[in-house]
Image (cartoon, grey):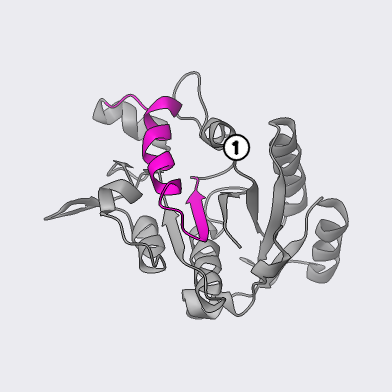
Amino acid sequence: MSAAYFIAGTDTDVGKTTVAAGLLHAAQLAGLSTLGAKPVASGCEVTPKGLRNSDALALMAQSTVKLPYERINPFAFEPAIAPHLAAREAGVDLSVAGLLGPMREVLAQGADFTLIEGAGGWRVPLSHHANLSDLAIALKLPVILVVGVRLGCISHALLSAEAIARDGLQLAGWVANIVDPRTSRLEENLASLAERLPAPCLGRVPKLKIASAEAVAEHLQIDLLD
């Protein structure tokens, strides 16, 4: 197996990074080399080494192919706001062209299992004219969709899947991340998602007390990916 995927969420705070780290760990357990990247991140912490994002660091921790932080997360912003707004405040012009080079370098490392993680939902803006989804389109990557299971998740998931298909990309698989275990009719909601999403469910991640990559990986099946 040697493959790369773009990992997207149905919304913000649905556990994209938690699931991405779990997928990378599951790939390691299968004997694969791994590499995760976060092209754009806001909500970064100021450190002596520069701005650092917890999501990007989590991906690095589960990557067996080691690269400097700046190559994993080339665009980092301090405010925890939408990336295009954070970039504007920092005086940085975000563009698909500016992200393509760094992410092609990541893909060129040739890891057996590579994940490039988006930010927020599928249509997060990069600029006035571009969205982060345009990067996935330019890279022609199949998509893994993280569905934050809570009230309203079916519509969010189906709309995201429709947009991914309309953009000409393959939905390779999806993960049910149960962010609200008290969701009414939980099993019925999960069954509806499985019936309607045109891709295999790679796993159901329960609400974990400690959502470590190791714990999440136990609930995932990467062998269901093409």
In this rendering, the count of numbered labels is 1
Quarter assignment of residue 15: bottom right
| Residue 53 in the figure: left or right of residue 134 | left
Give whichever of 75, 87 is nearer the camera: 75
| Residue 170 in the figure: left or right of residue 218 | right
Give whichever of 94, 24 is nearer the camera: 24
Q: Quadrant of the N terminus?
A: bottom right
Which residue sits at x=57%, y=58%?
Answer: 2
Q: Quadrant of the C terminus?
A: bottom right
Percent across and percent down for residue 131 are: 52, 29
Say whether residue 183 is visible: yes
| Residue type highlighted by circle 1 | Lys
Percent across and percent down for residue 74 are: 31, 42
Which residue sits at x=53%, y=57%?
Answer: 16
Which residue sits at x=50%, y=56%?
Answer: 114
- Single out the residue that lies furthest toward the top: 129
Asked if residue 93 is among those painted magenta in the image, a careful observer would answer yes
Q: Callout 1 environment at 10 Å: few (<14), some (14 to 19), or many (20+)?
A: some
| Vertical relation: 135 (above or below) 95 | below
Segment colored magenta: 92-118
Asked if residue 181 is among those painted magenta in the image, a careful observer would answer no
| Vertical relation: 48 (above or below) 21 | above
Percent across and percent down for residue 63 are: 40, 65
Secondary structure at badge 1 equals loop
Q: Which residue is mark 1?
A: 140
Say whether residue 124 is visible: no
